Image (cartoon, coloured by chain):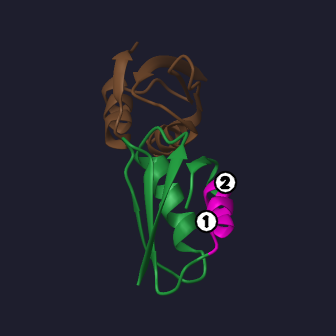
Chain colours: A green, B brown
């Protein structure tokens, strides 16, 4: 299993967290998603490594920005 | 038609606005709801006056607080 972490900016509440979780969770290969609102830390688990650009695109689709990626 | 205004605190983003609109819109008698995120102004339209406590309860159900009511 692979774990990758990203930093997301722009989330202000639990609804924002849910939106990011939902979009990232829909990326093919993703098996687990965790988001910490206070720090913006997004943790993505998958069986095989996922191209970071796909995660960044999902975060942007949700309406937020990735400030730091693998 | 009656229009009543409330001030809601705690909303941080468009998702919060949507939650308040949804809950208040479900109150019996409500025919229109408008929420301004920047000011927290909640405008409720109805055919007949609605007991403010019912609107306050709906806002709290959505997870926010009413700071000012009719």
Residue at the image point whose x is 52% and y is 57% from the top: A20
Would you say the magenta stretch is mainly helix, strand or loop? Answer: helix
Between the C-alphas of marks 1 and 2, the distance is 9 Å
Question: For residue A8: magenta?
Answer: no
Magenta extent: A51-61
Residue under pointer 2: A60
Q: Compared with residue A16, is residue A25 higher up or lower down, i.e. above or below?
A: below
Residue under pointer 1: A55
Q: Compared with residue A50, is residue B67 higher up or lower down, i.e. above or below?
A: above
Q: Going by the image, does B30 lie left or right of B65?
A: right
Residue at the image point whose x is 59% and y is 77% from the top: A50
Q: In the rendered structure, which disc, 1 or 2, sits on the residue that comes first in sequence?
A: 1
Q: Going by the image, does B67 lie left or right of A55?
A: left
* Front residue of B21 and A1: A1
Residue A69, percent from left and from top: 56, 57
Residue A10, percent from left and from top: 55, 39
């Amino acid at each position: 299993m692979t774990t990758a972490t990203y930093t997301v900016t722009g989330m202000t509440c639990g609804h924002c967290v849910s939106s990011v979780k939902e979009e990232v969770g829909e990326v093919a290969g993703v098996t687990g998603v965790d988001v910490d609102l206070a720090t913006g830390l997004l943790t993505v688990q998958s069986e095989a490594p996922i191209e970071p650009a796909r995660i960044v695109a999902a975060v942007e689709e949700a309406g937020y920005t990735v400030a730091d990626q693998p």
